Image: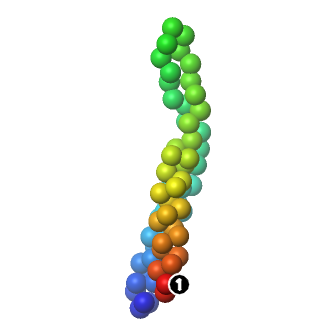
Amino acid sequence: MNEEQLTTLKHIRNAVDDMFDKLDRDLYEKKLAAKVSYTKVRPSDLVAENLEYIVSNLDKLKGGE
């Protein structure tokens, strides 16, 4: 890989890390029933598998595999 491609991969990796940091907080989902209740939802848990896949493949590309 040339230097420009490595720089692009680094920027993508940083963007993914930043996105994960922004998603890593608690939110509450409203449950409608006779009595309204809320359940805690962590958006980062919903996308963690996809982000891990992206990051691992970016690391493979960076390593030249």
Lateral position of residue 20 relative to residue 12, left or right: right
Front-most of residues 7 and 65 = 65
Picture layout, residue 7 above or below residue 23: below
Q: Residue 21 placed where, x, y %?
A: 57, 55
* Neighbours of disc 1 within 10 Å: few (<14), some (14-19), many (20+): few
Which quarter of the figure has residue 25?
top right
Instruction: State which quarter of the image contains the N terminus.
Output: bottom left
Find disc 1 in the rendering and name its residue: 63
Front-most of residues 24 and 60 = 60
Confirm whether residue 20 shows in the render. yes
> Which residue sits at x=56%, y=24%?
38
Picture layout, residue 43 above or below residue 2: above
Lateral position of residue 34 relative to residue 5, left or right: right
Picture layout, residue 19 above or below residue 59: above
> Which residue sits at x=51%, y=8%?
34
Q: Residue 36 placed where, x, y %?
A: 53, 15
Which quarter of the figure has residue 35?
top right
Picture layout, residue 24 above or below residue 15: above
Q: Which colour scheme is used?
A: rainbow
> Which residue sits at x=41%, y=91%?
2
Q: Residue 52 placed where, x, y %?
A: 53, 62
How many numbered discs sit on the rendered protein?
1
Label 1 is placed on what type of residue?
Answer: Gly
> Which residue sits at x=48%, y=72%?
57
Confirm whether residue 10 shows in the render. no
Report helix, strand or loop for mark 1: helix
